[in-house]
Image (cartoon, rainbow, N blue to C red):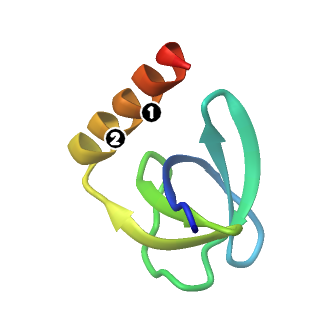
Amino acid sequence: MCLAIPVKVVELGAGDTAIVDLGGVKKEISLALLADVQVGDYVILHVGYALSKLDPEEAEKTLALFAELNEVS
């Protein structure tokens, strides 16, 4: 099973890279598959690549559900 998760872009890097926030962990990812990503955007991340931009409201809802699941575990 594959999992893609929403992450927030916190910094644009060199070339087609960005730094994202993954629950407090910063990670460098590739933006090679997307155009026009800005700091503050949410993207769907899968194996190090941003696959698509995501509506901020939907991203927040999804992240809240993940946090809720983490509390139950």
Identified at 36% across, 27% down, the residue is: 64
State yes or no: discs 2 and 1 in contact (Cβ < 8 Å).
Answer: yes
| Amino acid under disc 1 | Phe
Above or below, 10 against 47 in this view is above
Residue closer to the observer: 26 or 6 = 6
Q: Could you tell me which residue is drawn at 41 percent across and 53 percent down?
A: 41
Task: Determine crowd level at label 2: few under 14, some 14-19, many 20+ residues with C-alpha closer than 10 A.
Answer: some
- SS for tag 2? helix
Q: Quadrant of residue 63?
A: top left
Q: Is residue 30 found left or right of 56 in the rendered image?
A: right
Identify the residue at horizontal 46%, vertical 67% (top origin). 37
Residue 35 coordinates in the image, percent (x, y) = 46, 81
Identify the residue at the far bottom of this view.
33
Percent across and percent down for residue 39 are 50, 51
Left of 30 or right of it: where is 60? left
SS class, disc 1: helix
Q: CA distance from mark 2 to mark 1?
A: 6 Å
* Residue 43 located left or right of residue 15: left
- Which mark, by number, is residue 66? 1
- Local crowd size for mark 1, using a 10 Å CA cut-off: few (<14), some (14–19), many (≥20): few
In the displayed structure, 44 sits above or below 6; it is below
- Taking the image as shown, residue 61 lies to the left or right of residue 42, namely left
Q: Position of residue 17 (x, y in %)?
A: 71, 69
Q: How many marks?
A: 2
Give the quadrant of residue 50.
Answer: bottom right
Q: Which residue is mark 2?
A: 62
- Res 7 label: none
Of the 4 image quadrants, the one containing the C terminus is top right
Indicate the quadrant containing the N terminus: top left, top right, bottom left or bottom right: bottom right
Q: The residue under label 2 is which amino acid type? A: Thr
Of residues 47 and 36, the one nearer the viewer is 47
